[in-house]
């Protein structure tokens, strides 16, 4: 099933709340990367502007990796954010985006969507969403943060390395979903999570994050370039780092920029 996104009915929502995320939405037919498009217009557009594309042909993941999406079947969206914060606080918006998407997917599908720290949303042990926050500095301050969200909605047939690892709402729930409905839910949730995070920081979200984070309570492998360590993942800190206990009982924390986290035997 292909439904083409032409507009989003957010009027009702905006009337009810004086929200800023989604006040302006740019909908494209096709683009290489919505994050790249958003970066080009970030300084001339207001905070909260969203770039959506029906099809994304050169989606980006972290560290030069790529993000695959189907033609007119999935969600590629980038939110232009300009919080008055430092770069690290802005980079942690990945975690806040994860909470918002997890909640939106649970509302839409009825199934719990978990988080693999820091930026994967997982349904039935399959990665159904990835988040990419990209920041820019201007005059020693944060210029903008582009929060890119890719959600596999109606695509199927993941190939190669994605066959075992990736899933979509369609592949996991065996029914088609309206992309518009999910986008609207993500926008609604972001309008709740984002202002609270900018005002109060990450601490108020720790409990919720830990309850959704699949890594907590598990042995994990921490991959840093060519080196690997294993440890037991205990908690998340008020700056969004993972607390790891090693074999000798010593604790340390790792930040998202430093390491990739895997399960002992694979992706989870
Ligand atoms: C991510 O990176 O998961 C961030 C993905 C962000 C995509 C959005 S779409 C809108 C916006 N515009 C962009 O250009 N990007 C953002 P990372 O943690 O590095 O994971 C990338 C890895 O996920 C790849 O190396 C693959 O293994 C896997 N992957 C690629 N496409 C996938 C998909 N559709 N579903 C699940 N896994 C995928």
Image: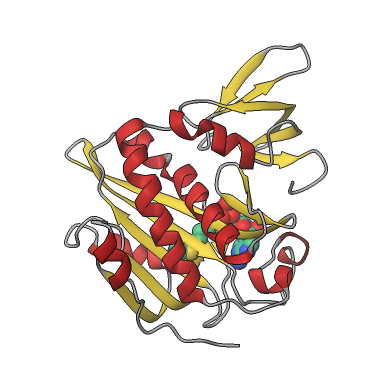
Horizontal relation, residue 174 to residue 177: left or right: right
Q: Nearer the viewer, residue 27 or 183?
A: 183
Q: Give the residue furthest to the right.
A: 265
Q: Does residue 24 appear in this view?
A: yes
Residue 134 vertical placement versus 187 (above, below): above
Residue drawn at x 69%, y 12% as measured from the top left:
250
Horizontal relation, residue 64 to residue 113: left or right: left
Q: Position of residue 213 (x, y in %)?
A: 63, 40
Q: Nearer the viewer, residue 166 or 14?
A: 14
Q: Nearer the viewer, residue 222 or 12?
A: 12
Q: Position of residue 105 (x, y in %)?
A: 57, 60
Q: Position of residue 244 (x, y in %)?
A: 66, 23
Corner quadrant of residue 27:
bottom left
Q: Assign ligand 1 to one image quadrant.
A: bottom right
Residue drawn at x 23%, y 39% as measured from the top left:
84
Residue drawn at x 19%, y 59% as measured from the top left:
46
Residue drawn at x 73%, y 30% as measured from the top left:
217
Horizontal relation, residue 233 to residue 189: left or right: right
Corner quadrant of residue 180:
bottom left
Counting every numbered tag in the picture gives: 0
């Amino acid at each position: 099933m292909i439904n083409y996104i032409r507009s989003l009915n957010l009027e009702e929502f905006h009337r009810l709340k004086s929200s800023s995320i989604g006040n302006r939405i740019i909908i494209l037919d096709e683009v290489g990367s919505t994050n790249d498009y958003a970066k080009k217009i970030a300084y001339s557009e207001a905070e909260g502007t969203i770039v959506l594309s029906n099809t994304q042909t050169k989606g980006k993941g972290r560290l030069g990796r790529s993000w695959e999406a189907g033609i007119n079947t999935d969600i590629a969206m980038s939110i232009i954010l300009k919080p008055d914060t430092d770069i690290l606080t802005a980079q942690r918006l990945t975690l806040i985006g994860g909470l918002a998407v997890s909640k939106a997917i649970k509302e839409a599908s009825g199934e719990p969507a978990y988080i693999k720290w820091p930026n994967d949303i997982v349904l039935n042990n399959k990665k159904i969403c990835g988040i990419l926050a990209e920041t820019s500095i201007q005059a020693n301050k944060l210029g903008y943060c582009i929060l890119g969200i890719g959600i596999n909605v109606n695509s199927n047939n993941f190939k190669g390395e994605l066959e075992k690892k990736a899933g979509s709402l369609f592949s996991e729930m065996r029914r088609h979903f309206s992309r518009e409905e999910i986008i609207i839910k993500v926008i609604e949730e972001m309008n709740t999570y984002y202002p609270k995070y900018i005002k109060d920081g990450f601490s108020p979200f720790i409990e919720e994050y830990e309850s959704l984070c699949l890594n907590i309570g598990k042995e994990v492998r921490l991959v840093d370039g060519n080196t690997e360590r294993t440890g037991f993942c205990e908690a998340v800190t008020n700056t969004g780092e993972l607390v790891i206990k090693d074999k000798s009982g010593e604790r340390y924390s790792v930040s998202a920029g430093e390491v990739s986290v895997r399960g002992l035997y694979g992706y989870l």
